[in-house]
Image (cartoon, rainbow, N blue to C red):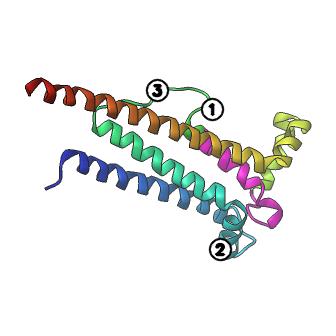
């Protein structure tokens, strides 16, 4: 018979795997849908070769983030603070994905992103647009780094809360002896 802790871990793991898979599928779907001039397999292959680290890094980081969050909730912990701005995990994921799509455009992938690229100068100005395009790869890695950092921060917070939850139980055992 499963204990509540094992059941909680299993449920959280399932949700994390599902979230990571959805992230991976969504990213690849956007690449395939926005690349009408290449066969599906070619677009898929280009995305994995050029942005594999970002693609799988985001999927794993989001999966772990969902696991940590759901496991904490099942134990009654609330480890996430309500944050605003681009410091959060979901915003960083979106920005990292957004920038990583730009690096696929020269390969013939994500042709629809050319429209977005053409609109950037009118929205942000020419100099800023050139920076976004020129440094899309480093900006993608920066976004991935923020997602991984945010996930690691929450995992550390959960680990600390778990230690705190274990201390009173150990003290109870000592007092009964």
Pick the quarter of the image with the N terminus. bottom left
How far apart marks 1 and 3 lie (CA) works out to 14 Å
43 relative to 138, above or below: below
Asked whether the viewer can see residue 116, the reply is no
Categorize mark 3 by other alpha carbons within 10 Å: few (<14), some (14-19), many (20+): few
Residue located beneath label 1 in the image: 86
Q: Which mark is residue 40?
A: 2
Q: Is residue 96 magenta?
A: yes
First along the sequence among labels 2 and 1: 2
Residue 5 locus on image (x, y percent): 24, 45
Whole-percent x, y for residue 113 in the image: 75, 54
Residue at the spot 79% in from the left edge and 60% down from the top edge: 105
> What mark, if any, has residue 77 been given in the picture?
none
Q: Which mark is residue 81?
A: 3
Q: Secondary structure at mark 1?
A: loop
Mark toward the start of the polypeptide (2 vs 3): 2
Taking the spot 58% from the left edge, 39% from the top edge, the residue there is 149
* Residue 70 in view, yes or no: yes
Residues under numbered marks 1 and 3 in contact, where contact means CB atoms less than 8 Å apart:
no
The local crowd at label 2, few if under 14, some if 14 to 19, many if 20 or more residues have their Cα within 10 Å, is: some
Magenta-span inclusion, residue 100? yes
Labels 2, 1: front one: 1
Span highlighted in magenta in the image: 92-112
Mark 1 crowdedness (10 Å alpha carbons): few <14, some 14-19, many ≥20? some
């Amino acid at each position: 018979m499963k204990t509540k802790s094992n059941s909680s871990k299993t449920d959280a793991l399932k949700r994390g795997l599902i979230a990571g898979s959805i992230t991976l599928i969504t990213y690849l779907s956007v690449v395939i849908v926005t690349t009408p001039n290449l066969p599906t397999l070619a677009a898929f292959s280009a995305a994995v070769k050029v942005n594999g680290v970002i693609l799988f890094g985001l999927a794993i980081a989001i999966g772990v983030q969902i696991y940590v969050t759901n496991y904490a909730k099942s134990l009654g912990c609330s480890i996430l603070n309500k944050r605003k701005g681009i410091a959060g995990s979901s915003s960083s994921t979106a920005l990292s994905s957004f920038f990583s799509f730009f690096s696929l455009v020269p390969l013939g992938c994500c042709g629809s992103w050319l429209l977005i690229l053409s609109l950037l100068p009118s929205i942000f100005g020419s100099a800023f647009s050139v920076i976004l395009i020129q440094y899309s790869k480093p900006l993608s890695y920066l976004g991935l780094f923020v997602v991984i950092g945010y996930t690691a921060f929450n995992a550390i917070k959960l680990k600390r809360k778990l230690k705190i939850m274990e201390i009173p139980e150990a003290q109870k055992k000592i007092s009964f002896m």
